Image (cartoon, rainbow, N blue to C red):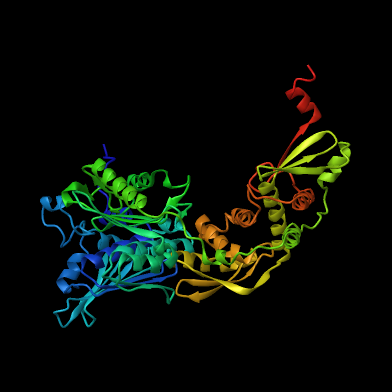
Amino acid sequence: MRSRIRVLPGELVEKIAAGEVVERPASVVKELVENSIDAGATRILVYVKGSGVEQIRVVDNGVGMNEEELKLAFQRHATSKIKDEQDLERITTLGFRGEALPSIAAVSRVEVLSRPAKEVVGARIVIEGGNILSLEPAGCPAGTSVDVRNLFFNTPARRKFLGSERQEFGRIMGVVERYALIYEKVHFKLFHNGKMVFDVPPGKLEDRIAALWGRDVAKAMVPIHSDGVVKLKGMVSKPHLTRKDKNRIATYVNGRYVKNASLVSYILEGYGTLLFRDSYPYAVVMIDVLPEMVDVNVHPSKYLVKFRDEQAVRRALKDVIWTTLTSQDNIPSAPAKETKNHRVPLTEVRKQRQVQFEVEKPKGKSIFDYIAKSRVPGMSVLGQFDDTYIILKSKDAIIIVDQHAAHERIRYERFLRDIKDRRIQELIEPVIIHLGIRDYNDLLSIKKELAELCLVIEDMGNGTVVVRGVPPLLKRDEVESIIRGIIDLGAKYIDRKRDEFIKLISCKGAIKAHEKLSIYEMEELVSQLLKCENPYTCPHGRPTMIKFTTADLEKMFKRNE
């Protein structure tokens, strides 16, 4: 009987093994950058073309390799970082499996130039699909240059599962950013399609955060430090500085970036009740433990780790964050622009409100059509309850309007018309916004889409953008918070989150709960709400008004029993 079990060909084995290490272009960048750090580099340059499939090139000034070492480096499980089984329990380098280079070479065309600083001549090797095409002496600078082209050329199925160029480069930028944050002595540069994306020279952690996440973020972060069996250092944001996602929580164990949900949850526990629900801080947390206390050999990607004493790590994180934050003044400073507020005469306020409530009458039916049918001749404003709800009366009902939800609906429908008619209000004094590098690049990548939402931005370079045009319903002092809100929602997902962005802009400048209104303002707000095509709900689906009919009241007071 013929055996159904067979030994796979070596070439197929190489491709399968490569798939465990090289999932996408960002995996290549991660492995190469880690190799450069392990090689003692003080300068790492990363060049990316397109999504990274076309080309990735990483250049460093590390220790370099001679011709013999270069050849061995591409043999699977060849490494200079461990010698025996005991070394697995005291790993101090980022790489150690000896899988990175052979895995990358198995699914791409790789050219490496390398030279140790003490040697006059370096070496050049070219490998395609795991096969060495050439190996020869070559002149080159001290250090190593790895050029990876045509990634996944021999595994086309893997290419089909990659995202767009914007998404894949975003992942690459995230990889470089995470290591640029904490390796303070290394000069990092990242280039995309020939353009420099960021340049982070050696500097302290707060300088790195300012360069990559923005100066305003860095100013609102405080250092943490703890000694003991579990050593901790880094920076966390004060409770008032938060995001709607966890993308600015970076955790490291013995210098290695890790994705560990438990560590994130311990950081959040450290904030206790200081954080508002569904909000997340900015944090760069570096954990140092004895190598034997952590297992980094859990997965080929090396993103996952296991601690021997998980509870010790939890206690240390919670204690240092809570102690640090509760010893700080956590009252957020008011923006400078808010100090310019001055009293405005009521007549001027009314004038401004009237303009703000201006809504064109829709061509379709309005609520007045239904009021007539229900034999309700009209409504009048009685007043405001809790500075949040407007109370109206009609012939046979009391109607309660949520002023914030009502104004959201008015702004939402007006904004939709502004988008349709391409109405853009040019700002006499443009708004300048300083952003972190990733947010800056994400925003610039959707510049065209923002213009379709009546937001006109220009690139000023070095993490700075200027907003020159906005939808007419926006006030100048709302612009920066709108832009940052768009970033928090996930700028790169604008195609599928367009309506969320529109709702964000509609909500941002709307009248808030507990905001006192005059009778005139209440009448104007209700009048404009009743002209909306859908006056019954806010853009998020909450009701704008509810009513109690005479029959409802009689039932509640048991008058009709």
Q: Nearer the viewer, residue 16 or 69?
A: 69
Residue 338 rendering spot, x and y as whole percentages: 56, 63
Q: Nearer the viewer, residue 426 or 74?
A: 426
Residue 436 rendering spot, x and y as whole percentages: 44, 66
Residue 217 rendering spot, x and y as whole percentages: 42, 62
Q: Residue at x 83, y 42 (%)?
A: 379
Q: Is residue 154 visible?
A: no
Residue 69 falls left or right of residue 32: left
Residue 394 falls left or right of residue 477: right
Q: Residue at x 21, y 69 (%)?
A: 40
Q: Is residue 99 above or below residue 322?
A: below
Residue 454 rendering spot, x and y as whole percentages: 65, 66
Q: Nearer the viewer, residue 95 or 16?
A: 95
Residue 392 sits in quarter:
top right
Q: Is residue 368 above or below residue 256?
A: above
Q: Residue at x 81, y 55 (%)?
A: 361
Count of number-bearing discs: 0
Q: Name the quarter where the N terminus is drawn.
A: top left
Q: Is residue 540 above or below residue 413?
A: above
Q: Name the quarter where the C terminus is drawn.
A: top right
